[in-house]
Image: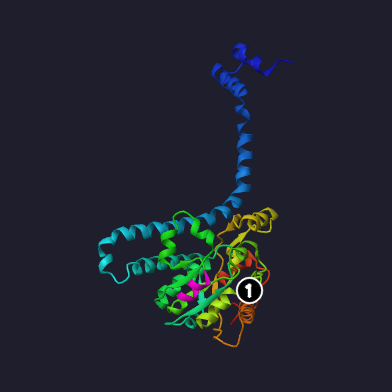
Amino acid sequence: MPHENDTCFRGQESVNYFSCMIHLWEEWTGLENMENYFNYLDYLVWVFTPLAIVFILPLFIVVFIYLSILFLHVYKRKNELKEAYSYNLWDGARKTLATLWDGHATIWHGYEIHGLEKIPDKGPALIVYYHGAIPIDYYYFLANVIIQKGRTCHSVADHFLFKLPGFKLLLEVFSVIHGPQQECVRALKNGHLLAISPGGAREAIFSDETYTLMWGNRKGFAQVAIDAKVPIIPMFTQNVREGFRSLGSIKLYRWVYEKFRLPIVPIYGGFPVKFRTYLGDPIAHDPNLTAAELADKVKLAVQSLIDRHQMIPGNIFRALLERFDRRHKED
């Protein structure tokens, strides 16, 4: 049986010369298999696109934070000449950024905050909250305090945050401190609001959709409240773990954190789930309570908010549907 290429050289009975050369070129280069290659490529794109998206979305939050920092630098340069005459140079910047973050909260998460009236209009208070994988709910809370209360809430953050490039100005403008007890007490005695998550980076990394509090035996925050003689307000945000999740269950990341105290763990998500922040009743200063007793009391209050407002285990699909369902667990 003659080879099919032989037809290129059989005169009138063969295909025309141009078509023959195209056929030979395809065989020589392997282009005749390109359709199969493209089909395989389409399959890979179909499989990996959702996976890529859930890891890329958290980067948008980082980009948004750096855009906020860029705005502050631009604002600073624009108002240099007015600094000597302005009572507070950064009020306008804080309110502008608060408006942007509040807009993001409303559009992407249908954000609601319940119990903001429990935050005093004047005077100090310590807010204690559950820490999500990315505490974006806390950023939304800060924005609402600035917009609705006209106050800036000081924040205690992990030392790691102060080592990130470019963050210095942002941390200064929004009164973020690394948390020595004396500095926290000083902020409260000066009449400021102060917020802290006792679980910190450990809770952010290793807690999961079961919303386990990881405070250990930490009671420094309670001692701060006792020394400053201020009330403590518990806070929790519904579905915060469905918005962003971490891969902290992988042993390698836990080993790295325990060994070097580096919170380097992949985070995925950015899902537009429903966020509702709940503020509990203030726990008044009681001089008869020890720091350990007060810490246990506050932990019980935060756990009560979780039990009351969060379905365990958390579910991303259910949290997405809550964007369209006005019914939710009541106070």
Q: Residue at x 53, y 80 (%)?
A: 227
**274, 321: nearer the viewer:** 274
Q: Is residue 288 left or right of residue 120?
A: right
**Whether residue 289 is situated above or below residue 255 in the rendered picture:** below
Question: To which residue does mark 1 refer?
Answer: 310
- Residue at 57% over, 87% down: 287
**Position of the N terminus by quadrant:** top right
Labels in figure, total? 1
Write down the region rendered in magenta.
Answer: 180-186
Q: Nearer the viewer, residue 250 or 276?
A: 250
From this viewpoint, is residue 204 visible? yes
Q: Residues within 10 Å of mark 1 (few under 14, many from 20)?
A: many
SS for callout 1: loop
The amino acid type of the residue labelled 1 equals Gln
Q: Quadrant of residue 16?
A: top right
> x and y percent of residue 162 in the render?
49, 59
Question: Which one is in front, 223 or 320?
Answer: 223
Instruction: Let me know if residue 232 appears in the view.
Output: no
Farthest right residue?
1
Residue drawn at x 25%, y 62% is 81
Residue 122 place in picture, x, y as percent: 42, 82
- Magenta segment main secondary structure: helix
Residue 184 on the magenta span: yes
